[in-house]
Amino acid sequence: MKPILEARHIDKYFEGPVPFHVLKDINFVVNEGEFASIMGKSGCGKSTLLYILSTMDTKYTGELFLNNELITGQHPNKLAFLRNRYIGFVFQFHYLLAEFTVLENVILPARKLGIKTSAEIKADGFNKLKMLNIEHLAEKKASKISGGEKQRVAIARALINDPAIIMGDEPTGNLDSTNSENVFNIFRRLSNEEGLSLLIVTHDKDFADKTDRIIEMEDGRILI
Amino acid sequence: MTNWAVILGIAKTHLRSKFRQTAIAALGVTFGIGSYITLVSFMTGLNKMLDDLILNQTPHIQIYNEIEPTAVQPINLYEEFQGYTTVVHSVKPKQVQKKIYNASPMMDHLNNDPLVKAALPQVKTQIFYISGSIEIGGNLTGLDILKEVENFNFGDYIIAGTANDLKNTENGILLGIGIARKMSLDIGDRVQITTVKGEIFPLKIVGIYQSGIAELDNIQSFANLKTVQKILGEPNNYITNINVKLHNIDNAVAMAGVIEEQFDLTAIDIQTANAQFETGTQVRNLITYAVSITLLIVAGFGIYNILNMLIYEKMNDIAILKATGFSGRDVQYIFLSQAMIIGVIGGFLGLLLGFTLSSLIDRVPFETESLPTISTYPVNYQLSYYIFGIAFALIATFFAGYLPSLKAKKIDPVHIITGQ
C-alpha cells in the first residue's frame, strides 16, 4: 500500500503566558484508498493536527510527508500549490463564496490550478455536481441553497482537482442525520469506487465506526 | 505563477456585490481627479492670461539710456589713492542725452540678428494735457504703430479707432481712456498738449487706448514716431528707446547682457522686469497642487476604508481561498486589483468630469473692462495635466489598497476556520 500522508514526530505548542503542549510526538500514516477518522474529545488537539496535516499551519516541529515528499519547511506558495493540487477540504461550516454561483465555487480551485481550459474545467465541475446529484443547482447563487446542499457543493469543490486525499473537519457536525448519512455515503463511495484517501475529524461515534480506521486521540497523543 | 483571469474575476465579483460602496469609493477618486483637472486648467489658464497680458505687450528687451551716477568716480582712477578708502559726497548723475546714439545702425544690426524677431524704435517724452486752464501730466510715446500691432498685439488695446487711423493721421493721437474720460474727450475731438519746454500742439484724437492697468491709462497716450519727434523739435534719428522682441523669450537674459556690453546702454530683459510676476504664478500653482493633492488623499482614505471593511466582511472567503490553494500573494492581488479597478474607473471618470467642468468654465462669460481681449474665463487644456491626473489616481489608489491587501495576505486561514 502506498502511503499518501505521513506524520513523523509532530510536536506543537500553543504559545501564550503559559506554553501549552498541544500535540505530543504524533506519528501515523494514511495509505492510498484508506478512509480514516480521527476521534477524540474537544480540546484533545484533533483539529490542530488536521490543520498541520493540511499544510495551512506551519508552526510545528517534526516532519510531514505528502506522496513521500517532505513538505515541512516548504515555501508558503509551494504549500498553497500542494493544497490546491493534492488536498481537498470539507469543513463543518460550508464556506462557499456567497456571491458566486455553485458551479463557480466548485471550479475555483481548478481555475487557480490553471492546467485545463475553462471549457474542460466547466465540464469537470458539472460532472462532479452530477456525481453528487446536485447538477440542477449549478447556476444558483451559493447563498441561496440549503445547508445539506452546501456541504455537497463543498465536497464537489474538494474533488475538482482529483486530489490525493480529502480532509474533513467535522463535515457532518452541522447537518441533520439524513444529510449526515448522505455525506457519509458519498465519502464511502469515493473511497470504494475512486480509491480516494480520506481523513475526517469527527466526534460523531456512529460516523467514525463506519470508517475503515479510527485514530483515537487524547491529550495530544494518539491512543491507537 | 499567478492566474490573473481568476484573480480579476474574483475581484470583479467582490466589487459588483458591493456596488454601492464601490461606486462611492470610485466617486471619491472621480471628484479628486475632476477637481484637480478643473482647478489646474482654470488656474493655469488664468496664469497664462495674466502672463500674456504682461508678456504680449512687454518687450523682451528694452534698451534705453539710464540716468545714473558714474560707477567709477575720477578719484578711483587716480593712482596715488589706490588702496585707500575714498568717500565722495553728493554724487550727481552723469549728464547723458536721452537719445540713443546711432540708433538706426544699431536697429539694423539687431534686426539682422537671427535671434531677434523685431527691434522697434520709440520716443518717450513727458507732456501735459491741457484742458482750459488745467494741465494734467502724462506720457506721450511715439511709435511705429503697425509694427507694434504686429509684434506686441498693440491692436488688442485700441478700443476705439484703428491702428491705421493713427498711421494715416499726421497729427493723430491715441489717447489713454483714463485721460479721455477725465477730459470728456472722444474720437474726432482735439486735445492740446504742451511739452516740458512749453510749446503747445493741438492733436486730433483718432483712437482710444486701454491697457487694463488704470494707472497707465490715466497718463499714457501714443502718436506716430514722426509726430513726437516734431513735437520735441528733434530730427528723425532721435530715438529714446528700442524694444526688442525675440523668437525665444529664454534668450532674453543673455541677449540683454550682450547688448549692454556692446553698446554701453541699459538693457532690461523681461525676466528681470517682471520677476514678481513669476512669483505670483508659482504661488498660484502651489495652491492648485496643494488643494488637488489634499482632495486625492481624502479619496485615498475612502478607498482604504472601504477595502478594510471589505476584508473584514470577506474573512471567510479569504480563509477558504487560502485553504483551497490560493497563496497569500494571490489573495493580496485580489484586493489590490480591486483598489486599482476603483482607481482606474474613478480616475478616468475624473478626467471626464474635469474636462466637462473646464469646458463649462470656458463658456462662462467673463467680461471686464481691464481685460479687453477676454470674453470668457480662460481655461488651459493641456494633455500633461490629464496624464498627471490619471497617474496620481493610480498611485494613490495603489497605496490606499496596499495596506489592506497586505492584511488580507497575512490572514491566517486556520485562525478563521477554527475560530468559528
Image (cartoon, helix red, strand yellow):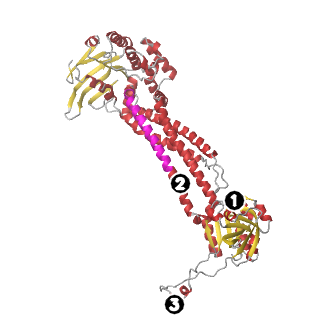
The one of B403 and B163 positioned closer to us in this rendering: B163
Name the side, left or right, on which A120 lies relative to A4. Answer: right
Cβ atoms under marks 2 and 1 closer than 8 Å: no
Q: Earlier in the sequence, mark 2 or mark 1?
A: 1
Q: Which mark is residue B80?
A: 3
Q: Are the numbered discs 2 and 1 placed on the same chain, yes or no?
A: yes
The part of the chain drawn in magenta is B289-318
How packed mark 3 is, by other alpha carbons closer than 10 Å (few <14, some 14-19, many 20 or more), is few
- Calculate the distance from the C-alpha at mark 2 to the C-alpha at mark 1: 26 Å
In this figure, which residue is indicated by the disc labeled 2? B284
Judged by depth in the image, the label closer to the viewer, 2 or 1, is 1
Name the side, left or right, on which B202 lies relative to B374. Answer: right
What residue type is disc 3 on?
A: Glu
Residue B105: x %, y % from top left: 73, 73
Q: Residue at x 78, y 69 (%)?
A: B171
Chain of the residue displaying label 2? B
Q: Earlier in the sequence, mark 2 or mark 3?
A: 3
SS for dot 3? helix
Residue B413: x %, y % from top left: 34, 29
Specify whether residue A69 is in view. no
Name the side, left or right, on which B51 lies relative to B108. Answer: left
Chain of the residue displaying label 1? B
In this figure, which residue is indicated by the disc labeled 1? B157
Q: Earlier in the sequence, mark 3 or mark 1?
A: 3
- Calculate the distance from the C-alpha at mark 2 to the C-alpha at mark 3: 56 Å
